[in-house]
Amino acid sequence: MPNWTIVRLDKSHDRTGFACGNDNLGEWIKSRASQFDRRDLSRTYVATRPGEFAVCGYYAISTHRVVYGDMPASESRGLPRMDVPVVLLGRLAVDQSSQGQGLGGFLLIDALRRALHISEQVGIRAVEVDAIDDSAQSFYLKFGFRSLLDDPRHLMMPMHEIRKLKLDPLP
């Protein structure tokens, strides 16, 4: 049995004690995630322990675009000179009580699976992330993300690379 269950955020989830070490990420899950959901700006998925409602970690995704000129040549070759549609992994955070247990990777893999599912319905070229700091950048690079040309912390993982991971489909 997995240590966590990942589901879409709803009113039953307890976010009051969430503290990940970054005030912006902690405050966002507590006060803004539901607003973003209601306004169709993003969707937030939370990890909880089975049978519990306290949020151990979360991520938020939405659609976005990467400017064609920011793409590495290896990814832009052969594409029309236009902005490229992506899934934006806007936030990913793990509560301090669950850090160091693999939850960040578990959340990231779930987000990649979800992006893969979305890409079967609409055109999506990659998953994009803006790493908040050097530690986050290292985390994403370890999973195979690559820097875009505009900023070393602006990262992407192309859908063709995600498909190679052979992830289990969403239930």
Image (cartoon, rainbow, N blue to C red):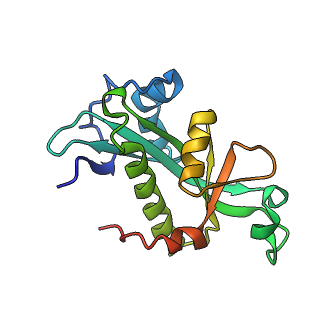
Q: Nearer the viewer, residue 165 or 80?
A: 165
- The quarter in which the N terminus is drawn is bottom left
In depth, the one of 86 and 155 nearer the eye is 155
Residue 121 on image: x %, y %: 51, 74
Q: Relative to 55, is 146 on the left or the right?
A: right
Q: Position of residue 72 (x, y in %)?
A: 79, 61
Report the side of 96 relative to 81 (left or right): left
Q: Quadrant of residue 69?
A: bottom right
Q: Is residue 132 visible?
A: no
Q: Name the residue nearer the viewer: 151 or 10.
A: 151
Q: Is 63 placed left or right of 151 in the picture?
A: left
Residue drawn at (44%, 62%), measured in percent from left and top? 114
Q: Residue 168: give x, y in percent of width and height.
A: 36, 70
The quadrant in which the C terminus is found is bottom left
- Numbered-mark total: 0
Q: Is residue 79 above or below residue 138?
A: below
Camera sees residue 105: yes
Identify the image quadrant of residue 159.
Answer: bottom right
Task: Name the residue rendered at 31%, 50% in the picture.
Answer: 6
Query: In the image as oriented, which residue stretches furthest toward the bottom?
Result: 78
Front one among 5 and 139: 139
Q: At which x and y percent is residue 126?
A: 62, 63
For the point 77% across and 69% down, the residue is 74
**Above or below for 71 versus 94:** below
Vertical placement of residue 15 versus 165, above or below: above
Placement of 89 over or under 29, stated as above or below: below
